Image (cartoon, rainbow, N blue to C red):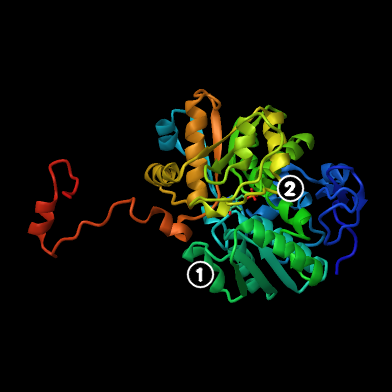
Amino acid sequence: MSKGNGMMRALKCRECGRQYPLEALHVCDFDFGPLEVVYDYERIQGVMTRDLIVSRPQTMWRYRELLPVVDDPTVGFEVGFTPLIKADRLAERLGVRELWVKNDTVNYPSLSFKDRVVSVALSRSRELGFDTVACASTGNLANSVAANAAAAGLKAYVFIPADLEQGKVLNSLVYQPQVIGIQGHYDQVNRLCAEIAGKYGWAFVNVNMRPYYAEGSKSMGFEIVEQLGWRVPQHTVIPMASGSLLTKIHKSYRELSDLGLVEASGWRIHGAQAGGCSPISQAQKAGLDFFKPVKPETIAKSLAIGTPADGFYALRVMKDTGGAADDVTDDEIREGIKLLAECEGIFAETAGGVTVGVAKKLIASGKISAEDSAVLCVTGHGLKTLDAVQGCVGKAREIKPSLREFESALTGDGQLTR
Ligand SMILES: *Cc1c(COP(=O)(O)O)cnc(C)c1O
């Protein structure tokens, strides 16, 4: 167990402001509002400089003063600092001046942005003395908890909807945690996990550890700013499941600008969902500040949360920054995956197809001006959702092993005959 609170001050209810000790707690006893970590920004301002950040290893932990751990992280110290790619070919196809892809498909170790939140949650769980960790997951979180818990020697229970993609299920099983497939959708998994978390003394990364877990997402925003040469992008397009990542990227920009580490400038935060599970984007498009829960039906299973825990706050961030949301069909998701692969050589999972598809719509409608610069957050690897593109990327042209066969299969313009 660690002593002191590091740069953290307390947990605080986002609704009523009541403060709580820095333990495994996530809701306010009085109004059930979500708890959030409060930092000692004055102390942070005294120590955190660009020079200090740049002098540290290229991982998400170079921003450690703004992450909720007291001591050195003990889980996932290689996570983060994924490439920010200048996507000129995609920019041209989508009709915008400048485009960047924050490529978390290659995050370490489990190939999604979830490694960020999990390394924070598991490091903090250890500080609080837990030896067993758990999660309610739409797939990637389970993969990351399973991998990081294995590497750290923690016991792990991962709860997933039973009908997830095979790739996602296997990517949890291989690390040999306890994998529980629930016959129901994510929102039912989550409800069950809330009950289990109350009864067993485990660190549920996205239930009782959620205030710490969620802060890990900020590292994606810190990296974007640093990799752009200490500049906040004009537009950021972010996929939404619970809406947490979106709110935390906004928070990361605000923290860096409040601390004077980056020039304060206007930025717009945009949200992306799949049409088959779009409670937040439907509300945003209707101009509402609350959402109606839905029953998910989409190939973007990693985003299939019908009752998004941070939906309300995500709507507020988009409103406050002048951002927008939109959603895309399953076919548009597949097209988005192919477009990103063809233009930039990046194979994303369905959530990446959602982000690219929605960015295309926001540019076409002028919500992202053709003169502007935008960052797309691409959050998970395509090898985990092969089922989604199976049958829509063509197939190999088969020939006998002879030069004559090859040459007769070739057309004049270098393409293969069908
Ligand atoms: C979990 C996840 C998200 C977003 O999750 P939030 O709950 O909104 O923070 C985005 N993309 C992928 C691939 C994910 O696994």
Residue 150 at least partly seen? yes
Q: Quadrant of residue 26?
A: bottom right
* Labels 1 & 2 near each other (Cβ < 8 A): no
Q: Residue furthest left?
A: 404
Task: Please give the residue where the numbered disc 1 appears in the rendered image.
Answer: 170
Q: From this view, report whether residue 189 is shown above or below residue 83.
A: below
Q: Quadrant of residue 177?
A: bottom right
Label 2 sits on what residue type? Answer: Leu
Label 1 sits on what residue type? Answer: Leu
Q: From this view, report whether residue 306 is shown above or below residue 131.
A: above
The number of numbered discs placed on residues in the rendered structure image is 2
Queried on whether the Cβ of the residue with tag 2 lies below 8 angstroms from ligand 1, the answer reads no
In this rendered view, identify the residue nearer to me: 247 or 99. Answer: 247
Q: Secondary structure at mark 2?
A: helix
Residue at horizontal 44 percent and vertical 49 percent from the top: 346
Residue at horizontal 78 percent and vertical 45 percent from the top: 48
Image coords of residue 282 (percent x, y): 60, 36
- Disc 1 versus disc 2: nearer the observer: 1
Separation (CA) of disc 1 from disc 2: 40 Å
Residue at horizontal 52 percent and vertical 53 percent from the top: 105
Relative to 43, is 234 on the left or the right?
Answer: left
Image coords of residue 355 (percent x, y): 52, 42
Residue at horizontal 79 percent and vertical 35 percent from the top: 258
Dot 1 or dot 2: first in sequence order is 2
Q: Dot 1 surroundings within 10 Å: few (below 14), some, or many (20 or more)?
A: few
Task: Please give the residue where the numbered disc 2 appears in the rendered image.
Answer: 52
Image coords of residue 66 (percent x, y): 77, 49
Image coords of residue 1 (percent x, y): 85, 69
Q: Secondary structure at mark 1?
A: helix
